[in-house]
Amino acid sequence: MNAFFPRDTLLLIARLGLALLFLVMGWGKISDFSGAVGYMIHAGAPLPTLSAIIAIVAELGGGLALVFGVLVEPVAILLSVYTIATGFIGHHFWTMSGMMRYDMMIHFYKNISIAGGLLAVAATGAGRFSLTKKQIS
């Protein structure tokens, strides 16, 4: 496969696709901070106000880093850990029953899948279309 196309193009699309979730969710939290804190309380997150701030920084900061291709490898690993942690905190399907259990199970495993995609991006790097322009070997 040519190192310029489509591999670098696909890496850009992957980064943008993964970043979209974090940017949308982070923007939602920053534009309705009290609602974000309320959700953290409802989800049982530790220190709800601090958790909301951490979520905003992780989601907006990490999402922007993925978009621009800055520090992609460490950011993708950190976002992967963050995504798994939020799955355990916010989608604990094993404590639920009925349709809520099924719904939260889907969300939990989507988090695991997103984390897998982030680890793949961490392993491959940002590609040519990034501010760092690190080459893939």
Image: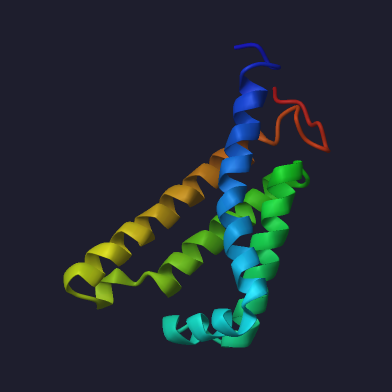
Residue 80 in the image, given as x and y percentages of width and height: 55, 55
Residue 34 in the image: above or below residue 100: below
Q: Residue at x 61, y 18 (%)?
A: 6
Identify whether 131 is placed above or below 109: above
Q: Quadrant of residue 100?
A: bottom left
Which residue does the image show at 68% across and 36% down from the upper left?
A: 125
Report how many numbered discs are placed on residues in the image: 0
- Tell me if 72 is positioned left or right of 37 in this view: right
Quarter that holds the C terminus: top right
Residue at 69% of width from left, 45% of height from top? Answer: 73
Q: Position of residue 115 (x, y in %)?
A: 50, 51
Q: Residue furthest top?
A: 2
Q: Is 99 positioned to the left or the right of 24 in the image?
A: left
Depicted 110 relative to depicted 89: above or below: above
* Scheme by which the image is coloured: rainbow
Name the residue: 71% across, 44% down: 67
Picture quarter containing residue 101? bottom left
Please state the horizontal and vertical placement of residue 41, each as a whole percent of the image.
49, 87
Q: Nearer the viewer, residue 85 or 49?
A: 49
Q: Nearer the viewer, residue 123 or 72?
A: 72
| Rendered-image quadrant of the N terminus | top right
Q: Measuring from the top left, give residue 44's x and y in whole percent.
A: 44, 84
- Residue reaching furthest left? 98
